[in-house]
Image: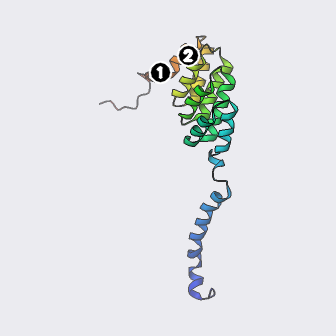
Amino acid sequence: MVHHPVFKSLSPYLTLPFTLFSAVLAPLTLASPGLAIGYNYGQCVTDLLEVGLSAEAVASACASALRPEQVGSCVLDVTAVTELSAEVALAACSRDRRPLEVATCVVDIHEFLDVPNSAAVLNHCHRSILPVRYADCVIDTALVAEIATTDSMALCIAAGYRPVDVAPSFIPTR
């Protein structure tokens, strides 16, 4: 039946959908479904229990997290470099869409600058849309301009500044 002339002429068209279907689904089935994108709930629970949070708070936080493994890692990193409680770190890390970047922001600022208030650093990193970029701004501004860390944080978090009279202007003149 495969050797029938009709099937020989249709065979390239019949294999194309199967090939596309296989090419799309094969990589998805080979990877573990949760580990590649941060759905490792066990790691989240382990990390949060390690910093001394209650089992009820850990279960609730990990179950409701979009990326539970990243939330646990964020809390571990923040509590390792600050004097903040695990509850405060969990509140910021679990409500952020980029918990790993929040942790990187906090760690970087603490590593390069003298930080008088760790809670303010965590709050600003959490509020920033791009936490790693925010940390770069704070560190570079404070070090190069030789201003206080708190002043640098306030300058970098302000979104109201808009440059004016920037050349060239692509707005057509009439």
Q: Which residue is mark 1?
A: 158
- Between 9 and 141, the residue placed more toward the observer is 141
Q: Which residue is mark 2?
A: 152
Query: Could you tell me which secondary element the residue under label 2 belongs to?
Result: helix
Rendered position, 152 above or below 90? above
Residue at the spot 65% in from the left edge and 14% down from the top edge = 114
Disc on the earlier residue, 1 or 2: 2
Residue at the spot 62% in from the left edge and 46% down from the top edge = 39
Query: Given the image, on which type of amino acid does mark 2 rest?
Result: Ser
Query: Could you tell me which secondary element the residue under label 1 belongs to?
Result: loop
Rendered position, 55 above or below 152? below
Return the x and y of residue 54 as percentages of the image width and height: 63, 33
- Total marks shown come to 2
Asked where in the image residue 137 lies, by quadrant, the reply is top right
Query: Given the image, on which type of amino acid does mark 1 rest?
Result: Ala
Q: Are marks 1 and 2 in contact (CB under 8 Å)?
A: no
The residues bearing labels 1 and 2 have C-alpha atoms spaced at a distance of 10 Å
Q: Which class describes the residues within 10 Å of circle 1: few (<14), some (14-19), or many (20+)?
A: few
